Amino acid sequence: MFAPVSAGAGEQVPKAPLNALSIADITGIPRETVRRKPDRLTGKGWVERDQNRHWRVSRQGADALRGCTDPTLADLGELRRVLIKA
């Protein structure tokens, strides 16, 4: 269904698709820019658009970014553990 994103320790979490306004709100990128840029990512096969015009990361995109996202998620998980103990 949706490309999974690693949540650490081998766990995979499906991510729901987002519309341009949601992406703009989350990232702070102007909405018009958000509307234009995914075309380039679609050309690379990194994102897909569904029938409701929502964007989602494709399996190819998730695989391409896994080397960046896995270490970041591991760091965030460790930060969470430290904060819980504090």
Image: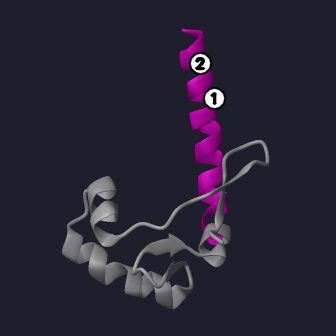
Q: Is residue 65 left or right of residue 56?
A: right
Mark 2 surroundings: few (<14), some (14-19) or many (≥20) residues within 10 A = few
The structure residue drawn at horizontal position 64% and vertical position 68%, both measured from the top left corner, is 3
Read off the residue under disc 2. Answer: 82
Q: Is residue 10 left or right of residue 45?
A: right
The magenta stretch spans residue 8: no
Answer yes or no: do the residues labelled 2 and 1 have beta carbons within 8 Å?
A: yes
Q: Residue furthest bottom?
A: 43
Q: Position of residue 77 (x, y in %)?
A: 62, 33
Q: Position of residue 9 (x, y in %)?
A: 77, 42
Of residues 52 and 26, the one drawn nearer to the viewer in this rendering: 52
* Rendering quarter of residue 24: bottom left
Q: Position of residue 41 (x, y in %)?
A: 46, 81
- Report the amino acid beneath label 2: Val
The structure residue drawn at horizontal position 48% and vertical position 86%, both measured from the top left corner, is 42
- Report the amino acid beneath label 1: Glu
The magenta stretch spans residue 78: yes
Secondary element under disc 1, as helix, strand or loop, is helix
Magenta region: 64-86
The structure residue drawn at horizontal position 57% and vertical position 36%, both measured from the top left corner, is 76
Specify the quadrant that holds the C terminus: top right
Secondary element under disc 2, as helix, strand or loop, is helix
Read off the residue under disc 1. Answer: 78
Looking at the image, residue 82 lies above or below residue 71: above
Q: Position of residue 62 (x, y in %)?
A: 63, 68
Specify the quadrant that holds the N terminus: bottom right
The structure residue drawn at horizontal position 29% and vertical position 73%, both measured from the top left corner, is 34
